[in-house]
Amino acid sequence: MKSFPPAKIRNVAFVGHGGAGKTTLTEALLFAAGVINRKGRVEDGTTVSDFDAEEVKRNISVSASLAPFEWDGYKINLLDSPGYADFAPDAIAALRVADLAVFVVSAVEGVEVQTEFMWKTAAQLNVPRMIFVNKLDRERASFQRTLEQLQQSFGAGIAPLELPIGEETQFRGVADLLSDTAITYQNGQPSTGEIPDDMQDQEHAVHDSLVEGIVVADDDLMERYLDGDVPSFEELEKTLAHGVASAQVFPVLCGSAAKDVAIDRLATFLCEIGPSPLDRPPVTAKAGDKDTEIPPDPNGQPLAAVFKTLADPYVGKISIFKVLSGTIRPDAVLTNPRTHSDEKLHGLFTLRGKEQVAVNDLPAGDIGAVAKLGDVTTGDTLAPKGTPVVVPPLDPPARVLSIAIKPKSKGDEDKLMTALHRLQEEDVALGVRRDDETHQTLLSGMGETHLAIATERLARKFGVEVQTEDVIVPYRETISREAEAEGKYKKQTGGHGQFGVAFLRVEPLERGAGFEFVDKIVGGAIPR
Ligand SMILES: Nc1nc2c(ncn2[C@@H]2O[C@H](COP(=O)(O)OP(=O)(O)OP(=O)(O)O)[C@@H](O)[C@H]2O)c(=O)[nH]1
Ligand SMILES: [Mg+2]
């Protein structure tokens, strides 16, 4: 792939609830862009982004995949992320490098738990957002109902730019509210026409609220609009782009990934309105104790952040990174400030699913990959020699479930530990711990499916079959309230008798404060 300047790069993460159609939409876009000449299907395990054996087996995405393509002179780096809650850490990693998050929402199911969770996360990370209402060709799909849910859940910034033409099996196109035109599709091919008569009323109503939603992002335009001036199409587009980049306006597009309706419009929208890396605030990095801002300048010092690692049994380790500054060229030598070791980037490429695509160089804002970096893992920064700036990585997620594992064949213990270490490199959500008290190896993660997939990967990628066993919980007791007891000692065996009384008082300390013994014997009443 040729090299694109930052202004022509769009880093876009597809996020949302499981099954909303993110992978199918990725496939439809790659097809529309001519990157693939046949669309694969999630059910058949033939899509570009769901390529892992574990994804093919379950028909869900397990890990975020990169799928770059060219459109109208732009390079769109799509990140198709998993919707299933167990794999949310990977979706969050994708959000972190995205300049726009596209929330894919099913018009049948509407806003779901993971849609809301990812929205909250994207808002915290200050990532611009938009929505693609998908599956409008399905029975019981409703754009109106979904739009109302979006407005209820995510507030006034929700701005519908399109209305569907036809419902369910009759769904065939969209009405563009900004240009007042209808675009209908046949086998993925658009044709432009007039908005159908029976939609005029609905169109006018939504059009006015859309214009009002957009002009709020620009005070001057707002004033003119209130004075009765009708903003031009270009003015609206410009204000819309500004509103999107500043995460104030959340445009809603719609279509069908399965039936190739309005897919081209999504791609064009990403290029024309979607923020480029230049439209985002600079990344804050640490130079020693000091914060320093890194603008995405292709002529600056080269700096990259590794946000994902793949452990390929054949190629070895693949580190996927975003270039934050400068231009990374093949054979660049950069330092990993965490380990202080120099890393040579032999051969740069990008990934499209599992396929490696060669690139010449990677300027600021772009995403690429490199194989076989020695001591580099997810979250590491690659910085120029002598300028060890560090981009702080995300905190690892709180793991919710543990299982105990042991190798099926005796003698595989060492092999298991090596494999676990490599597995952890590609899956930061996975925790590995050896419990010295119970002598068990504990694997912890985000849920049952996550851990089941981890053990399947151990076998498939590293040839270590493991069996799971019950986790032994070493019970402990503690003092929970104050108590006092008295003990008496009497002995009469001729000669002097022995007699003693001792009081013992126990009381809890603060949790985790340990153990404290207080000797309250007074006046030598009890000999040492
Ligand atoms: N009818 C119809 N079906 C769709 C459409 N988009 C996706 N599907 C189907 O919905 C199911 C889930 O689609 P995926 O593309 O795997 O959804 P996803 O969002 O990637 O799911 P996760 O990766 O598990 O989060 C598949 O059976 C698709 O064929 C659509 O526009 N119309
Ligand atoms: Mg998927």
Image (cartoon, rainbow, N blue to C red):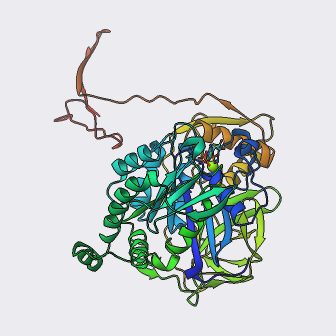
Residue 106, compared with residue 254, is above or below; it is: above
Image location (x, y in percent) of residue 34: 74, 66
Identified at 65% across, 54% down, the residue is: 260
Image location (x, y in percent) of residue 352: 72, 63
The residue at the far left in this view is 523
38 vs 67, left or right, is right
378 vs 178, left or right, is right
The part of the image, by quadrant, that contains residue 129 is: bottom left
Residue 63 visible within the image: no
Identified at 80% across, 55% down, the residue is: 313
Residue 252, compared with residue 247, is above or below; it is: above
The residue at the far right in this view is 314
Residue 462, compared with residue 310, is above or below; it is: above
Quadrant of the rendering where the N terminus is positioned: bottom right
223 vs 69, left or right, is left
Identified at 55% across, 85% down, the residue is: 387
Image location (x, y in percent) of residue 446: 54, 43
